[in-house]
Amino acid sequence: MKRFAMYPLAGIAILILGGFAGIAGSRAQTASDEPQFTNGNRLVRPANYRDWIYLSSGLGMTYSKQAGVPELFTNVFVAPAAFRAFQATGKWPDKTIFVLEERAAQSRGSIVQGGHFQGELAGLAASVKDVKRFEEKWAYFSFSAGDSSAAPNPRARCWQCHNDRGAVENTFVQFYPTLKDIAQKLGTYNQEKAANESGPK
């Protein structure tokens, strides 16, 4: 993910979910749920993602140990129709889009004397499945401050790690407890990939 100017990219990998397959029965996606593209494969920055389904948050999650990296919150949202499909099938439908936002972690403010709370936006990323548009089905995008669209990230930056370690279809469902329960019940959860603790290749 590209971070905004005050948070330089410091090798922190993105824990973004992004794998998808098979839509659930009669619950079709609406146009507002689907990713929009411009100038070829450039993803238009989703404007209403905070109206979507909130999945989970992480704090200071990284794939490598590096000193001096700012501790950030990560919040993950998924389009509502995709979430409903996952509830029914344990799989992600084509045209699903996830958004991951990063926010500064603050520990002092107002009456707070301990713990952390979320501050200003520090970065934004998205993952999309589009089986006809992308050769490898899934693509990952990073937005800088002010970007209205973004090109797909190189394969080595996100796709390979998600493919090797995503518990469900290139997605890190192992970090999302409500989805994990669903996938395990429906038999789509890959425990071997979820247990892979090695860092990015």
Image (tube, helix red, strand yellow):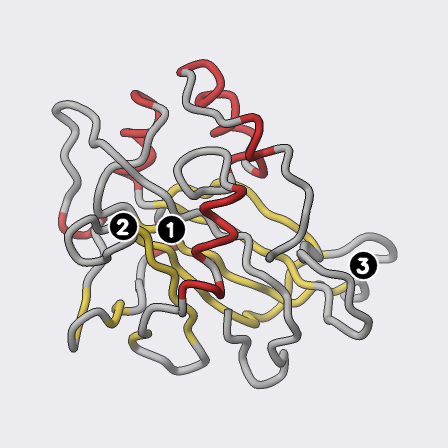
Element at label 3: loop
The residue nearer to you, when weighing 103 against 44, is 44
Q: Position of residue 85 (x, y in %)?
A: 27, 29
Q: Residues within 10 Å of mark 3 (few under 14, many from 20)?
A: few
Which residue bears the numbered disc 2? Answer: 137
What's the residue at 87%, 57% (across, down)? 113
Q: Residue extending furthest front?
A: 201
The residue nearer to you, when weighing 78 against 131, is 131
* 156 to the left or right of 106: left
Q: Residues within 10 Å of mark 2 (few under 14, many from 20)?
A: some
- Residue at mark 1 to residue at mark 3: CA–CA distance: 34 Å
Q: Residues within 10 Å of mark 1 (few under 14, many from 20)?
A: many
Q: Position of residue 118 (x, y in %)?
A: 65, 60
Element at label 1: strand
Mark nearer the viewer, 1 or 2: 2
What kind of residue is marked 1? Phe
